Structures are given as C-alpha cells and as structure tokens.
Image (cartoon, rainbow, N blue to C red):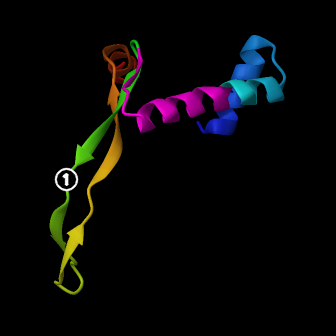
Amino acid sequence: MNKADLIRALAKENGLNKTQAKKAVELFFDEMTEALASGDRVEVRGLCSFFVKEYKAYTGRNPKTGEHAQVAPKKLPFFKAGKELKERVDR
C-alpha cells in the first residue's frame, strides 16, 4: 500500500472526497515528521512507534578505495512494530 492507496481507502471508508482524504493523510504525515524532527517519539498504540536515534561522528572507510573518511554525526528515524501488529501479521 502506498500513500495514494491510503488516501483512496480513507475516502471510501469515511465517505470523504479524495481532496479531504488527502489533506487528512498529509496532515498526519506532516505532524509525525515534525514531531520526529523535534526529537519527540510518535506512538500509535497497538500498531507501532517511531523514534529517532542519534549517532556520533566516526572515522569510516571507503570500501572501494580503502581511504579513511570522517562521517558526520547524524539522526535516523526508526520504526518498532507494536504487539498487536506483530500478532496480526503472524496469523
């Protein structure tokens, strides 16, 4: 399922037109993105949680040339499936 499929499903299930459904989906994703960008955790009970892990700078190696390079610190989003989601997928 992609974003367009989600919009169609939301519109169909709730009697919304596609424009209204698109606004709802985009609002959800925008708010989730803003929360993660500000360092907050996003949790949808029973489904999943999203959080950000911070990595320190380190010295890496280019596998092609073998040269050492400095890798800047970074933040990456992570997804953790909830218990209910795991159970439903495992059926």
Viewer-proximal residue, 87 or 21?
Answer: 21
Q: Is residue 12 left or right of residue 29?
A: right
Over which residues does the magenta segment extend?
A: 25-44
Quadrant of residue 86 within the rendered picture: top left
Residue at coordinates 70% horizontally, 21% vertically from top-left? 10
Number of numbered markers: 1
Q: Is residue 3 magenta?
A: no
Q: Measuring from the top left, give residue 50's x and y in whole percent.
A: 38, 30
Which residue lies most toward the front here?
38
What's under tag 1, amino acid-wise? Lys
Q: Find numbered disc 1 in the image and state the secondary structure of the residue it sits on.
A: loop
Residue drawn 69% across and 24% down? 24
Specify whether 54 is left or right of 23.
left
Question: Is 44 in front, or is 75?
Answer: 75
In the picture, the quarter occupied by the N terminus is top right
**Which residue is rendered at x = 84% and y = 23% of the image?**
17
**5 over 14 or under it: above or below:** below
Crowding at label 1, few (<14), some or many (≥20) Cα neighbours within 10 Å?
A: few
Which residue does the image show at 19% across and 53% down from the upper left?
A: 56
Which residue occupies the foreground of this view, 77 or 47?
A: 77
- Disc 1 marks which residue? 56
In the rendered image, residue 20, in percent from the top left (x then y), is placed at 79, 23
Q: Is residue 5 above or below residue 54?
A: above
Was residue 38 drawn as part of the magenta stretch in this picture? yes
Q: Is residue 50 left or right of residue 26?
A: left
* Residue 87 in the figure: left or right of residue 34: left
Which image quadrant for residue 89? top left
Predominant SS of the magenta segment: helix
Residue 70 % position (x, y)? 21, 71
Q: Please identify the quadrant where the C terminus is shown.
A: top left
- Look at the picture and state if 41 lies above or below 69: above
